Image (cartoon, rainbow, N blue to C red):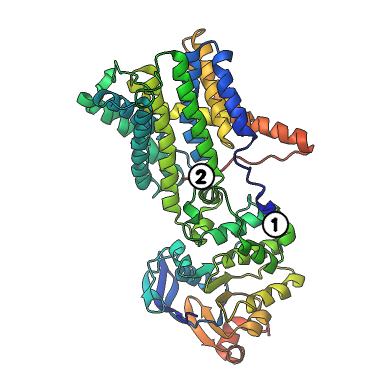
């Protein structure tokens, strides 16, 4: 298995005069579950966008192993094994659930996306992902008709479609009902160590429970990083973010 | 696998229906030439239906590629001794190449800016034709063209019926090819881009290149129609490359409905037949077309064929499901 880690060095992102990220350093160790937490507006999703290729940083670099991927587009990074889900559900609303997953799987099948002379051939991976995310029964329904929780599960399913080595999940539990939280949490934890998971999540109980490592962002800067126990005990973090929530 | 039954099988009932319609047209319509004109514009409209309905791209440049096909075919007929089939295919390939270049430069922008770029290229093409008077004949167009047999001296196109049979056969194959592409893996990517471009990119699809290739195929269809127009008329008049041609093809596509390739046939048929009928009654007949266009956009947003499909679906299932028309975006 490839043990290359993703390294971000001195990442800065400016939107006009606003510094969304300020000299952020981050190392995501292969096979780990690395969470990024922080208050709203701390720059978590911005950092995700830089790491997955949706946003070119104003300064700094992103490396995969020794390869500089700072300027590589999002679709290119998928082919290096980097996939993501979105904070605001971002699926193909008018296509079926199965087709949403199939499109994710098809993207990394060599030559398949350009095949125009024959029909679509079934792919076993689609069934596997539908089963893993508990969406089998809804496979033929229009994705837009799914409940919010099921759409979050589909988001994760689509991120797994390319069989990625690195999975970036942006608030996968946002708005998910209590009954589903445990199932999705188990699903996420089960992705490692075969895959590396980078997680943005506000549910602290889940984050502290399943993470190997946690980075805390506040106002675009890293204010702490460490194992869950260290983060829980860190006075700066308690003051800036956790407060009385744990 | 049943999971993909939402993709209609290939070929399906529509394909056989299309064949029946194409065979019946010259017998049903008042003249064979009208039938020939109809199939030519059906393919021209199909280029817009394909781009708008499957990929969500509104191109006002299809008239340019129609013109490249029309003039390309005329030049091939003048300067070579190629048969009609080779002439048409070569001219369509030229149009596809032109569309790929225009696409390469246009897909950098999305939405209304993409539409404006295609419109600008269409304008430019028309004036380029006027400027290159020595090659294109300027405002006179290219006239007095031969109409060689289909291939290798076989299949003489001397009678208007044989011309129709030739054009209808190409029309049928163009529809089958478009349907094939729409139901292929490539087509599924185009549909994904129409639905959600950001997600398609995040899944690993290089959206720009998929759009460029879709535009090249749209250019191929428009060029095919233009070349067929030249073979059918025996001349390449300037109005084949006018920006108004782009407009006409888009109008046909929208009248017919962009939800299915058949919409292009319905839209072109409606426009060509109505134009033929109205122009004999009133020289300002285009005004009536404009009124109809407004009425269709306001009251039948899925176009004529889309509305028929809705009625069939309603009759079959007993429940109403109205699909919103695809978003227009570049």
Residue A46 in picture, x, y percent from top left: 49, 69
Q: In the rendered view, would you say A193 is above or below A171?
A: below
Query: Disc 2 marks which residue?
Result: B55
Q: Quadrant of residue B124?
A: top left
Depth check: give the residue in front, A105 or A60.
A105
| Badge 2 density bin: few <14, some 14–19, many ≥20, Cα 10 Å | many
Marked residue chain, label 1 = A
- Left or right? Give the position of B242 relative to B140: right
Q: Nearer the viewer, mark 1 or mark 2?
A: 1
Marked residue chain, label 2 = B
Residue under disc 1 on the same chain as residue under disc 2: no
- Left or right? Give the position of B94 relative to B37: left
Disc ID at residue A95: none
Depth check: give the residue in front, A54 or B86.
B86
Q: How many labels does the image show?
A: 2
Q: Residue at x 63, y 43 (%)?
A: B9
Answer yes or no: is residue B325 visible: yes
Answer yes or no: is residue B120 visible: no
Disc ID at residue A139: 1
| Badge 1 density bin: few <14, some 14–19, many ≥20, Cα 10 Å | many
SS label for mark 2: helix
Q: Residue at x 66, y 47 (%)?
A: B6
Residue A126 in picture, x, y percent from top left: 63, 62
SS label for mark 1: loop
Q: Distance between the residues labelled 1 and 2?
A: 24 Å
Residue B209 in picture, x, y percent from top left: 41, 51
Q: In the rendered view, would you say B229 is above or below A93?
A: above
Q: Which residue is drawn at 59% across and 65% down?
A: A87
């Amino acid at each position: 298995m490839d043990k290359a880690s993703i390294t971000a060095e001195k990442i800065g992102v400016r939107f006009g005069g606003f510094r969304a990220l300020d000299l952020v350093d981050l190392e995501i160790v292969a096979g780990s579950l690395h969470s990024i937490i922080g208050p709203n507006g701390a720059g978590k999703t911005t950092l995700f966008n830089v790491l997955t290729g949706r946003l070119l940083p104003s300064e700094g670099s992103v490396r995969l192993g020794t390869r500089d991927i700072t300027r590589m587009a999002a679709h290119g990074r998928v082919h290096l094994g980097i996939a993501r889900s979105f904070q605001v559900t971002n699926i193909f609303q008018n296509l079926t659930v199965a087709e949403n997953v199939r499109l994710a799987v098809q993207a990394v099948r060599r030559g398949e996306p350009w095949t125009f002379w024959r029909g679509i051939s079934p792919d076993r991976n689609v069934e596997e992902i539908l089963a893993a995310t508990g969406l089998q029964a809804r496979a033929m329904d229009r994705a837009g008709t799914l409940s919010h929780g099921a759409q979050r599960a589909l988001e994760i399913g689509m991120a797994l479609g390319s069989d990625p080595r690195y999975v970036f999940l942006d608030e996968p539990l946002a708005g998910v009902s209590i009954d589903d939280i445990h199932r999705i949490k188990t699903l996420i934890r089960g992705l490692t160590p075969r895959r590396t998971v980078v997680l943005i999540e506000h549910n602290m109980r889940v984050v502290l429970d399943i993470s190997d490592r946690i980075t805390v962002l506040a106002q675009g800067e890293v204010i702490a990083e460490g194992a869950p126990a260290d983060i829980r005990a860190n006075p700066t973090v308690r003051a800036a973010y956790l407060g009385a929530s744990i | 696998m049943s999971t993909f039954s939402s993709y209609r099988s290939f070929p399906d009932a529509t394909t056989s229906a299309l064949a029946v319609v194409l065979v019946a047209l010259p017998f049903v319509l008042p003249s064979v030439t009208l039938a020939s004109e109809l199939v030519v514009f059906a393919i021209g409209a199909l280029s817009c239906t394909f781009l708008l309905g499957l990929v969500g791209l509104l191109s006002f440049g299809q008239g340019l590629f129609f013109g490249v096909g029309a003039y390309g075919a005329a030049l091939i007929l003048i300067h070579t001794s190629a048969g009609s089939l080779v002439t048409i295919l070569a001219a369509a390939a030229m149009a596809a190449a032109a569309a790929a270049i225009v696409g390469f430069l246009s897909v950098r922008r999305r939405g209304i800016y993409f539409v404006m770029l295609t419109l600008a290229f269409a304008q430019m093409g028309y004036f380029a034709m006027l400027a290159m008077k020595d090659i294109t004949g300027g405002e006179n167009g290219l006239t007095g063209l031969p109409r060689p047999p289909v291939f290798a001296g076989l299949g003489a196109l001397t009678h208007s019926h044989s011309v129709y049979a030739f054009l209808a056969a190409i029309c049928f194959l163009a529809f089958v090819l478009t349907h094939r592409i729409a139901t292929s893996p490539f087509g599924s990517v185009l549909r994904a881009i129409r639905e959600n471009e950001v997600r398609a990119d995040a899944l690993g699809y290089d959206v720009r290149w998929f759009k460029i290739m879709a535009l090249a195929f749209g250019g191929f269809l428009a060029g095919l129609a233009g070349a067929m127009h030249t073979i059918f008329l025996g001349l390449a008049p300037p109005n084949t490359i006018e920006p108004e041609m782009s407009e006409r093809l888009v109008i046909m596509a929208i009248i017919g409905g962009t939800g299915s390739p058949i919409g292009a046939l319905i839209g072109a048929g409606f426009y060509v037949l109505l134009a033929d009928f109205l122009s004999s009654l009133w020289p300002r007949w285009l005004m009536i077309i404009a009124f109809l266009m407004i009425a269709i956009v306001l009251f039948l947003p899925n176009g004529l064929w889309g509305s028929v499909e809705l009625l069939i679906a309603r009759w079959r299932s007993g429940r109403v499901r109205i699909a919103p028309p695809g978003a227009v975006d570049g």
